[in-house]
Amino acid sequence: AHPLADGRCAVLDRDRAVTAEGLDGFAPGDGRGWLELCAVWERLGDDLVKALFSPFPPVLAGAGLLARVRAAGGLRLARSLLLPVRRLGEEEFRGEGGRLLLAGNALHADLAPEAAGSGGFGWLMSMLGQFHGFPVPVGGSGALTEALVRRLR
């Protein structure tokens, strides 16, 4: 969730229809824009994850991904993913909700909103959350640190 000072909040729900409905509350039509971004993930997501988590260099996974990128919009898609997340949000959404979701997730990758490629990371992180959720350790983030310390010892 990404709250605004006025009390409104953009929420990434595991149900993409719920996410889309919430974004329509910021600007009518933004929910449709969200669902279009989800449709791109449906075409590319599996191959993208394979390419990201294959041993380097990801030749086979990368070849499959390139073929799918071409079918999913090719140069237009590549351009979108290379944009700064601020610009991608402005192009995809009229209201602040979708922009908040993309930018907030790009920031998790430690990329500034004006950094080239931050749009791709914002989309990637948003879609991972939309389709797979964001795991949280039982007991909160401090439990993760404790587990790492236990492992180190």
Image: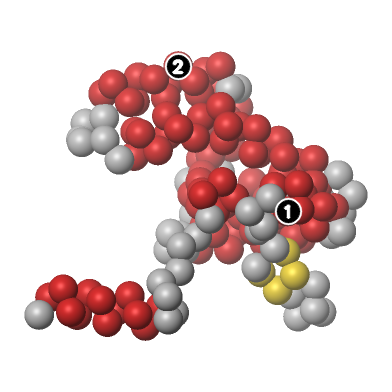
Q: Tell me the CA gap for discs 2 and 1.
A: 29 Å
Q: Is residue 41 above or below residue 24?
A: above
Q: Nearer the viewer, residue 76 or 18?
A: 18
Q: Nearer the viewer, residue 109 or 35?
A: 35
Which residue has dot 1 on it? 19
Badge number at residue 31: none
How was the colour assigned to the protein in this rendering?
secondary structure
Label 2 neighbourhood size at 10 Å, few (<14), some (14-19), many (20+)? Answer: few
Mark 1: amino acid? Thr
Q: Position of residue 115 (x, y in %)?
A: 49, 54
Please identify the residue farthest to the left as the structure is shown.
153
Mark 2: amino acid? Ala
Tell me if 12 is positioned left or right of 134 in this view. right
N-terminal of the pair, mark 2 or mark 1, is 1
Q: Position of residue 83 (x, y in %)?
A: 56, 43
Residue in view at x 58 percent, y 22 percent: 72
What kind of element bears circle 1? helix
Residue in view at x 59 percent, y 50 percent: 130
Which residue has dot 2 on it? 67
Quarter of the image where the C terminus is located: bottom left
Residue in view at x 66 percent, y 69 percent: 2
